Amino acid sequence: MKIPFPKKIVSHEVAEQELAILERAYPQAVTALHYTNPFELLVSVILSAQTTDTRVNLTTPTLFKKYPTPQALAKAKVGDVELIIKSTGFFRMKAKNIVSAAQDLVDKFGGVVPNDRDALQSLAGVGRKTASVVMSVAFEDAAFAVDTHVFRVSHRLGLTLATTPLGVEEDVTALVPREKWRFAHHWLILHGREICKAPTPLCGQCPVNKICPTPPIIAKLTATTAAGRIRRGAKAAATRRPARPSSAKKKR
Ligand code: SF4
């Protein structure tokens, strides 16, 4: 059952209440990626596309042991990197991107990860989302990254009707004080991973279920689906041929 997003946003007051509840629910909101410096975080975020943070964390110790700095990774053979990161998926493209990004870090930024959106987004494999994660997590800058969880949960909560990650970013950051943007990203991600899951949210366990606009949509959808099933069952029963008398009865 595909759950449609609400077609209307909630009031500003409700949106603030929802976000306040999530803030209380996830007070220790930090990234699940393991890293010890901005370079490791940057590489880990690039590798995290289309896979889980757990999978990335299983892969990066070997990668960073062999290539601990941008200088080392810049000189790596892409084929060797592919072998190490294979389990993260899309490994050919990711290997090419992280080696290329490391080369640019060395050639253009003195081997240092820049704390600047445009500079970050000039690196291979780094889009707005990755740049926002690096800025907010490594440098504690005001940035709000929109990944698939943030996109889905923001819509289900009625915080946005935007169809693009940038639109969601603009809508949600308008509701949250600037100094909390980097935490709001984690509230929504953690909530999406733990409770407001795709495809089926665990609304019964959700601390915002009294004010979230999605549970009534699910209830209506469930009722419509059940009614449809009953109607189809009744129609099938009405058109079914009467059963033939059994052979035992014929013999009698
Ligand atoms: S009530 Fe349901 S849809 Fe709304 S945020 Fe909670 S889990 Fe998600």
Image (cartoon, rainbow, N blue to C red):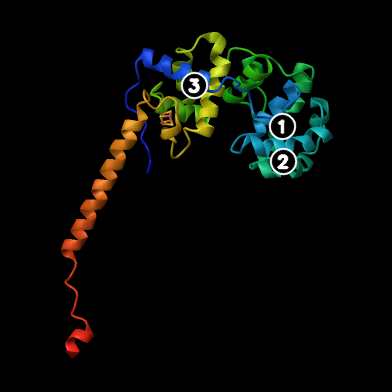
User: What SS does tag 3 mark?
Assistant: helix
What amino acid is labelled 1 in the image?
Ile
Counting residues from the start of the chain, the first of labels 2 and 3 encountered is: 3
First along the sequence among labels 1 and 2: 2
Give the Cα distance between marks 1 and 3.
34 Å
Residue 177 appears left or right of 226: right
Q: Is residue 208 above or below residue 219?
A: above
- The correct choice, above or below, for 223 with respect to 21 in the image is below
Q: Does 228 sit left or right of 21 as displayed?
A: left
**In the image shown, does 209 or 192 lie closer to the viewer?**
209
Which tag, 1 or 3, sits closer to the chain's start? 3
Q: Which amino acid, mark 2?
A: Ile
The quarter of the picture where residue 167 lies is top left
Q: Which dot marks residue 235?
A: none
Q: Position of residue 228 (x, y in %)?
A: 24, 48
Residue 85: image tag: 2
Quarter occupied by residue 233: bottom left
On screen, 191 above or below 109? below
What label does residue 22 carry, if any? 3
In this view, the mark in front (2 or 3): 3
Q: Residue type at mark 3: give it.
A: Leu
Q: Which residue is identified by label 1?
A: 98
Ligand 1 quadrant assignment: top left
Q: Looking at the picture, how far across and down is residue 113, in whole percent?
A: 73, 19
Secondary element under disc 2, as helix, strand or loop, is helix
Residue reaching furthest bottom?
Answer: 251
Task: Indicate whether 33 appears above or below 17.
Answer: below
Q: Residue at x 76, y 42 (%)?
A: 84
> Callout 3 environment at 10 Å: few (<14), some (14 to 19), or many (20+)?
many
Q: Secondary structure at mark 1?
A: helix
**Residue 110 image offset from top left, x and y in percent:** 79, 17
Q: Are marks 1 and 2 in contact (CB under 8 Å)?
A: yes
